[in-house]
Amino acid sequence: MFQGLVDSLKRLNILYDEVEQHYHVIAKLTGAMAKKYVFKGCSKAGKRDVAHVCDQTCSDCMVIPPCAFAEVRIPCDDCHRHFRKAACFANHKVRTWNRKSVCERKRCCETCGWPVMREKHE
């Protein structure tokens, strides 16, 4: 996949047809790659966004680019995780236009501290 050297929040996914020598716009990248989720930071496909790990995103709040580390980590009483700074904490509480927030999707067990992605955990 071609990655242009442009600093912009807008992104255009195109597919080049060598036979017709024509570019086609990809309206839905998930449909073109036949995957449920395509991560915007590295364009890799997967099943879930909260389980994705790469150096292009913040592992705590899942924003691009990653949040900078601060000396004191901020705890969340709802998901039992800790965040890099106040902006990182606020980002993880924000709901996306069609989904739950990172706080609602990614949490740690109160008892053992292990990351929990499903409802059933012992």
Image: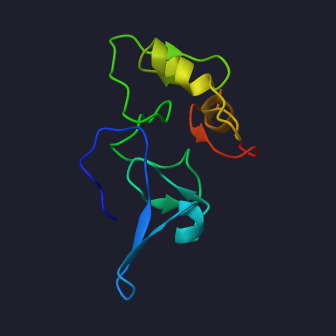
Q: Where's residue 14, x and y in %? A: 42, 64
Relative to 108, 45 lies left or right? left
Can residue 108 be seen here? The reply is no
Q: How many marks?
A: 0
Could you say which is closer to the camera, residue 119 or residue 58? 58
* Residue 121 position (above or below residue 80): below
* Residue 81 position (above or below residue 54): above
Q: In terms of image quadrants, where is residue 57?
A: top left
Relative to 38, 16 lies left or right? left
- Residue at image position (47%, 21%) is 88
Could you say which is closer to the camera, residue 95 or residue 120? 95
Could you say which is closer to the camera, residue 22 or residue 102? 22
* Residue 57 position (above or below residue 35): above
Q: Quick one: quadrant of the C terminus?
A: top right
- Residue at image position (33%, 23%) is 68
Q: Where's residue 50, x and y in %? A: 56, 44
The residue at the far left in this view is 5
Which coloring applies here?
rainbow
Can residue 63 be seen here? The reply is yes
- Residue at image position (37%, 32%) is 66
Relative to 15, 50 lies left or right? right
Q: Quick one: quadrant of the N terminus?
A: bottom left
Relative to 68, 84 lies left or right? right
Q: Where's residue 53, x and y in %? A: 42, 47
The residue at the far bottom in this view is 19
Q: Where's residue 102, x and y in %? A: 61, 33
- Residue at image position (40%, 47%) is 41
